Image (tube, rainbow, N blue to C red):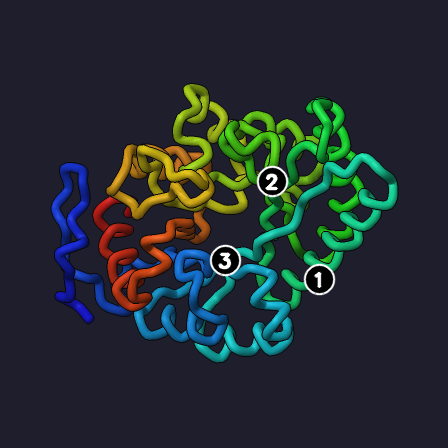
Amino acid sequence: MAGDRTDLDVPSGARAAIETPAAGDPRLSRLSLNQKTVDRLDLPAAVDLCARHGIPSIGLWREPVTEYGVAAAAKLVRDAGLRVSSLCRGGFLTAEDREGFRAAIQANQRAILEAAELGTDTLVMVVGGLPAGSRDLPGARERVADAIAELAPFAAGHGVRLALEPMHPMFCADRGVLSTVDEAVAMAAPHPASAVGVVIDTYHVWWDPTVAAAIGAAGARIASFQVCDWMVPLPADALLGRGMMGDGHIDFRALRGMVDGAGYTGDIEVEIFNADVWAADPDATAATVKRRYVSEVW
């Protein structure tokens, strides 16, 4: 597939489009394709796509994994010669009532077991927003901290790290009451770094004027590095405002330098929620991901 390039693949920034890196290109050694980037593919098709394009790692989501079967999914990925960079998602830990809180604990324990069976040590935690009708943001954060304290020993016992994902403040009410890397690191701090870490997702943290210092302070707690671009104007559903690297406003090389400088050596996961990307031919998407990864991130 080397040499393939489409007219759609012209980054809006200064860097020119490059030829498609071939399978085995050492520049792709840390590349992972998050399953959501090719959302219309089922699990076998997504795994096959990565294998055919020489993308060595895949980020999995629980719903399609559960539908396929966890043991079968682990074998599928293993037989394809891929590794699992992360499992998404655990979390949603902010329920105010005891029954809801206990249900969340049990659901996350199942997610931890699934991650272990899939062979990944990283369970991405989208911690949850405010419960319906609530305005008690400090209380929601306290419940997340309580839940992490309960889940961390269970996760560590199964070789899995809870990776707290700070999310852009526009998602604070409905998805994630942790909005900055500093907040996530502070919540992780009471626990061993091997048990509780943080996710650095460029879409969520690029705007933060303290992000360089925060990433440096995160150090060994960085469990996952995810990349996609910030597009304007945002769509009506802001969740789908993620763009292909190079199409928006994020300086990926600067952020990667911060993450690498903090000691992170793991996979770099491309996670794009975008209706146009989802509608595109998955093979074209995978090829574009490789080109943009090399031209914008690597």
**Few, some or many C-alpha atoms within 10 Å of disc 3 (few <14, some 14-19, many ≥20)?**
many
**Disc 3 or 1, which lies upstream in sequence?**
3
Amino acid residing under circle 2: Leu
Instruction: Kindly identify the amino acid type of the residue bearing the numbered disc 3.
Output: Ser
Instruction: Give x and y (percent) for residue 2.
Output: 17, 68
Residue 297: quadrant of the picture: top left
Residue 52: percent from left, percent from top: 32, 74
> Does 211 sit above or below residue 34?
above
Q: Could you tell me the amino acid type at mark 1?
A: Leu
Between the residue at mark 3 and the residue at mark 1, the CA separation in whole angstroms equals 16 Å
Q: Name the residue located 44 percent from the left edge and 61 percent from the top edge.
A: 39
Q: Nearer the viewer, residue 5 or 237?
A: 237
- Tell me whether circle 2 and circle 1 mark residues in contact (CB < 8 Å): no
N-terminal-most mark, 2 or 3: 3
Q: Give the label on residue 275, or none.
A: none
Q: Position of residue 196 (x, y in %)?
A: 65, 42
